[in-house]
Amino acid sequence: MVDELARIQSVIEKFVLFVQPKWKIANDIPGSGNTRNIGGVSNIQQLINGQGPFADLGEDVFDDYWQGYFNKVDARTAGIGTPRYNNLKSYKEYLKSQAQKLTKL
């Protein structure tokens, strides 16, 4: 059987392998609507080149974003009511509001 491998036609070919740190290819929305699973970009060139929305922001922003991310159910369970943010735009607004609180101290 092993000696016949060269004659067996593959059902797939032309693999493209790439390696990128998770934070460079992560998206700012979950992989599915009802979980906190970190979603990834779906454009193959962005995946290969590590050009997700956090790529220019850095791993520390990625970590802070996803460690503080809550979906609706998790936010209620945690006692915070509604999620603080749900994308990078609303995350930025959330951080601004937190910075304003700090200036009052």
Image (spheres, rainbow, N blue to C red):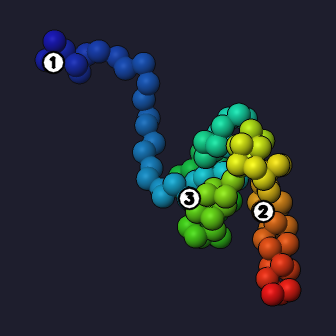
Looking at the image, do the residues carrying marks 2 and 1 touch, with CB atoms under 8 Å apart?
Answer: no
Looking at the image, do the residues carrying marks 3 and 2 touch, with CB atoms under 8 Å apart?
Answer: no
Circle on res. 91: 2
Q: Earlier in the sequence, mark 3 or mark 2?
A: 3
Q: Is residue 46 visible?
A: no
**Residue 23 vs residue 45, the one in the foreground:** 23
Question: Residue 45: horizontal and vertical position, in percent?
Answer: 60, 50
Amino acid found under the numbered disc labelled 1 = Val
Quadrant of the image for the C terminus?
A: bottom right
How busy is the neighbourhood of tag 3: few (under 14 within 10 Å), some, or many (20 plus)?
A: many
Q: Is residue 9 above or below residue 47?
A: above
Residue 94, located in which quarter of the rendered image? bottom right
Would you name the residue on which mark 3 appears?
23
The reply, left or right, for residue 28 in relation to residue 62 is right
Residue drawn at (80%, 57%) of the image? 84
Q: Nearer the viewer, mark 3 or mark 1?
A: 3
Circle on res. 35: none
Circle on res. 2: 1
Residue drawn at (70%, 48%) of the image? 78
Q: CA distance from mark 3 to mark 2?
A: 16 Å
Amino acid found under the numbered disc labelled 2 = Tyr
Amino acid found under the numbered disc labelled 3 = Trp
Q: Earlier in the sequence, mark 2 or mark 1?
A: 1
Looking at the image, do the residues carrying marks 3 and 1 touch, with CB atoms under 8 Å apart?
Answer: no
